[in-house]
Image (cartoon, helix red, strand yellow):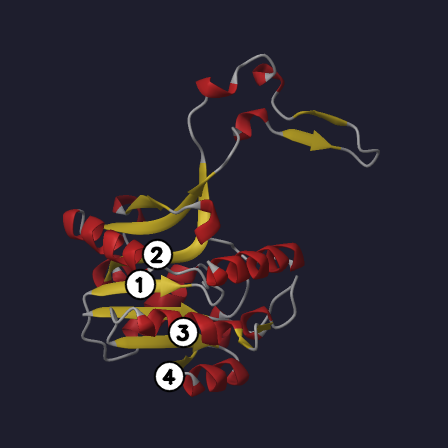
Amino acid sequence: MNLAIIPARKSSKRIKDKNIINFFGEPIIAKTIKLIKNTKLFRRVIVTSDCEKILAISKKYGAEIYLRKKKLAGDKIPIANVIKDLLKNSNLNINNVFYFYPTSIFIKKRYLLDSLKILKKKPNSMVLSICEYSHPIERSLIMNSKNEIKFKYKKNILKQTQYFQKSYYDAGQFGLAKKKYFLDNNVKNKKIIGYVLNDYDACDIDNYKDLKKAKFLFKKLKNE
């Protein structure tokens, strides 16, 4: 059995009420819930939050709800701790645990199916959605208050881009692991397998610039 968990805390520093912000006529978490449920891969979809409003909206759109403890609502609390708390305090007869961010509005069923295949081969690992940086971060630039730029890593000024190893970042969309992975306290033995998404199938919404990009991509993909 597959379980979907959506951790959605109340506070958001850069976008007020980000997890329930209006996104084409609905709270953004509502669209995420509907996308997850429409995959037909999950028997249960649970939203864990410290916010009664978020929980009420989530329930309205068909998700189960779990009131998160206040000590787990801070912005420095690892998401694994939130998931572990829910799993320990809920009677959940499940095998595979997906977690989705509330703003995961670009979910594709085939990505989830591919991730399940990976987990079947490597059951002691986590599968994490990632995207590839389009340019080597080793040749990144920094800029001061006068807009003057320089290479962050001087030793790489003369190196050509094709000689650098590819770099990736967390796509902010989903993660997948066995239930025991989240409940196991032995962090050293935990491995993470990356699942690479297309750039246009992911947009981690952290600020209003990201939100604008997400709206553009969502509208464009919907009309194709």
Give the label, 2 or 4, closer to the camera: 4
Residue occupying the point 44% across, 60% down: 106
Work out whether 213 lies above or below 8: above
Residue occupying the point 26% across, 72% down: 40
Could you tell which of marks 1 and 3 lies nearer the N-terminus?
A: 3
Callout 4 amino acid: Gly
Q: CA distance from mark 1 to mark 4?
A: 17 Å
Do callouts 1 and 4 mark residues in contact (Cβ within 8 Å)? no
Classify 10 Å Cα crowding around label 4: few (below 14), some (14-19), many (20 and above): some
Q: Is residue 174 left or right of residue 76?
A: left
Q: CA distance from mark 1 to mark 3?
A: 13 Å
Give the label, 1 or 3, closer to the camera: 3
Q: CA distance from mark 1 to mark 2?
A: 6 Å
Query: Which dot marks residue 98?
Result: 1
Classify residue 132 by image quadrant: top left
Do callouts 1 and 2 mark residues in contact (Cβ within 8 Å)? yes
Could you tell which of marks 1 and 2 lies nearer the N-terminus?
A: 1
Query: Which dot marks residue 175?
Result: 2
Which SS class for mark 3? helix
Callout 2 amino acid: Gly
Residue 141 place in picture, x, y as percent: 66, 29
Classify 10 Å Cα crowding around label 1: few (below 14), some (14-19), many (20 and above): many
Do callouts 2 and 4 mark residues in contact (Cβ within 8 Å)? no
Residue 209 in sight here: yes
Classify residue 22 by image quadrant: bottom right
Residue 52 place in picture, x, y as percent: 52, 85
Classify residue 210 by image quadrant: bottom right
Q: Single out the residue that lies furthest toward the front.
A: 224
